[in-house]
Amino acid sequence: MLAYAARRLVILPLSLFLVVMVTFVVLRLTGNPVDIFLDVTSTPEQVAALTEKLHLDEPIPVQFLIFLRDLVQGDFGQSLQFNEPALQTVLQRLGGTLQLAGTGLLLAIVLGVTLGLVCAVWRDRLADLVISSLAVAGQSMPSFWLGILLIQLFALNLGWLPTSGAGGWRHIILPAITLATILLPNIVLITRASVLEMSGEQFVIAARAKGLSRLRVLLTHVLPVSLNPLLSFLGIQIGTLMGGSIITETIFAWPGVGRLMLTSISNRDVPVVEAGVLVIAVGIALTNLAVDLLQMLIDPRIRRH
Amino acid sequence: MSATTLRPRRPLFGKGFKMTLGGGIVLGAVLLAIFAPLVAPYDPYQQSLSMRMKPPAWMAGGSPAHWLGTDAYGRDLLSRLIYGSRLSILVGVASMLFSCLLGSAAGLVAGYKGGRWEQVIMRFADAQMAFPDILLAILMVAALGGSAVNLIFVLGVSRWMIYARVVFNLTRSLRQRPFVEAATLYGASDRYVIWRHLLPQMVPVLTVVSTLQVAQMVLQETALSYLGLGLPAPTATWGNILAEGSSRLFVAPWIANLAGLAIIILVWGINMFGNGLREHVDPKSRLAPR
C-alpha cells in the first residue's frame, strides 16, 4: 500500500507540469496584461517597464522557462491586482473554499447515502419512486438557478438567512446546500444501485443465514462494501466539486479561491491564476490518492491486486 | 439481504414511458426552436421603454399582451425564451458531437494501438478528468472569446475524455472477441476491423452516453453564460436571460425563474430520454448513475 502511494506521488509532478504548461500557454494567448493594468494615460516608458518586468518581450517558451525557474523556488510572482505574492493571495482564500466545499460534501454524503439506502430498501415503492425521480430532476437542475431560488425564498421572502457574503454560520447554509445539490443526486443513485447489487452477494446471504437481522446485515455488511463505488465516484468528482465551488462562490459572493480565479482570469492576473490552478490541481491529486488508499482500507479485495 | 428482503417489483415508470415523455419534451423544444419566428409573438430584441419589467399575465399588473412578462428593456420574455432555445440546443448538440468525435477517435487509437499511444492518451484523459472542466472552459473562453463556434469548441474539448474512456474500454474488450480476432486472422486491415466490427458494436452505448452528455452541455453552456463568459450580451440565450434576471431578483424575479424553468424542463427531458434509452440498451442499468 505504501509502495503504491509512493508510486503515485512520483507521477504527480508530471501531471502538475502538464496542468501548469497548458494554463500558461492559454493565458499568454489571452492578451496582454499590460493593457489591462495600465490605463490610457500611461507613458510608453511605463508600458516598457512593466513589459520588461513581466518578461513579456521574450518569446513564449523563454517566458515559460523563466516562470518555471521562479516556480520551483516557490515564487509565482506578484499578483497584478493585489500587489502581493500570488501564492499568498490564493492561500488566504483557500480556507473559505475548503470550509464551503467541506460542508457541502459532508451534507451531500450524509443525506445522499441515507436517501440511497431508503431507495434500496424500499425498492420500487413510493419512497424509492419519489426520491429517485427527484434525483433525476436534481441532475437536470442548473446549480446557479437553485442558488438563486434559495436566495429568493430564504433571504428575500422569509428573511431568515443572509443573501451573500461570509460571516457567521448563517452565511454558509445556502451556499453549502447549493454546492451539495451538485453531487447529491448522483450519490443517491450510486448508493441505491450499489446496495442493491451487493445485497445479492454470497457473504450477505451467509450473514442472513447466521440469523442476523436484516437491519444489522444492511448496516454492518452491505453498507461498508457499497461505499466503495461511491468513493471511486467522489474521487473523480472532486474536480466537479471545485468547479461547482466557482459558481457557488460567485452566486453568494463567498470569499474563496473559485471566485478569485474567475476575477483573476478576467483581469489577466496570470500569477494568481497559475498559483490557483496549481493549488487546485495539487489538492485534487492528493484527495484522489487519499480516496484510493481509503478504498484499500475498506475493501480487502482491492488490496490483493 | 437476499432476494427475499428486496422484492423486485415491476417499475411504475418503464423505459417506454421515460422515452416517450423525455422524447416528447425534447421534440417539442426542437420544434419551438426551429419554428421560433412563427411561434414567438414578438421580436426578441425589440425594446419598449413603456413596457419595462411587466410581470407575467397571471401576476398582479401583468397583461395578456405579454404572457410571460417583459425584461428590464421591455423585451417580451416568451419570445426571448423561444429564440433562446435555438442557441442552447444548437450549442448543446454541436459541442456533444464535437467531443464525441474527438473522444471516440482518441479512445479508439488508445485502445487499438495500445502501448505508448495508450499511455499518452489515457494519462492525459485521467489528468483532465480530475481537473474541473468548468475552470478549463472558463480559461479557454477567456482566451478565445465567446462566440458560438468558440463555445462549441471549448465545451467539446472540456469533455472529450468521457467518450475516450468509454471507447477505450470497449475497444479493448471487443478486440478479444472471436469475431474480431477472426477478422484479423483473415488479414482484414485495421480500417476494415474498426469500421465493420468495432464501431457498429459501440453505437448503442455511444448513443446513450451522447444523449446524456447533451444535457450536461446545455447546463455547462448556461453556467458559462451565467458567469458572463457565454455569448455576448444582447443575444437571447437561456443562460444570458437567467444572468440578467438574477441581478434583478428584488424587482423582477420571474425573469430568472422562467429562464431556469426552461433550462430544467429541457435538460430533464433529455435526461429522461437518455435514461430510458440506456435501460433499453442495457436492461440491468435501471437508474444507475452516470
Image (cartoon, coloured by chain):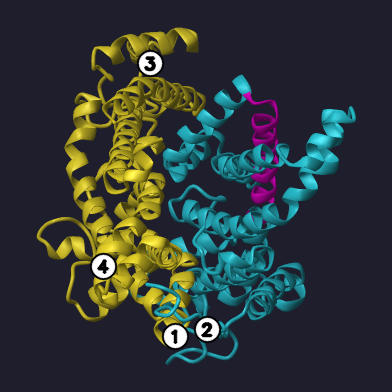
Mark seen at residue B9: 2
**CB of mark 4 within 8 Å of CB of mark 3?**
no
Image-based side of A288 in relation to A201, left or right: left
**CA neighbours of label 4 inside 10 A, class few (<14), some (14 to 19), many (20+):** few
Q: CA distance from mark 1 to mark 3?
A: 70 Å
Q: Is residue B113 magenta?
A: yes
Q: Which residue is mark 4?
A: A219
What residue is at 48 percent from the left and 10 percent from the top?
A: A61
Question: Can residue A163 be seen from the camera position used here?
Answer: yes
Disc 1 is placed on an element classified as loop
Q: Which label sits on residue A14?
A: none
Callouts 2 and 1 close, C-beta under 8 Å: yes
Q: Main secondary structure of the magenta part?
A: helix
Measured Cα–Cα span from mark 4 to mark 3: 67 Å
Numbered mark located on residue A125 in the image: 1
A280 w.r.t. B146: above or below: above
Q: Secondary structure at mark 3?
A: helix
* Tag nearer the camera, 4 or 3: 4
Give the vertical position of B64 relative to A27 (above or below).
below
**Where is residue B84 shown, x and y percent of the image?**
62, 65
Q: Which residue is mark 3?
A: A47
**Front-lying residue, B160 or B33:** B160
Q: Amino acid at mark 4?
A: Leu
The residue range painted magenta reads B92-114
Apparent colour of chain B = cyan
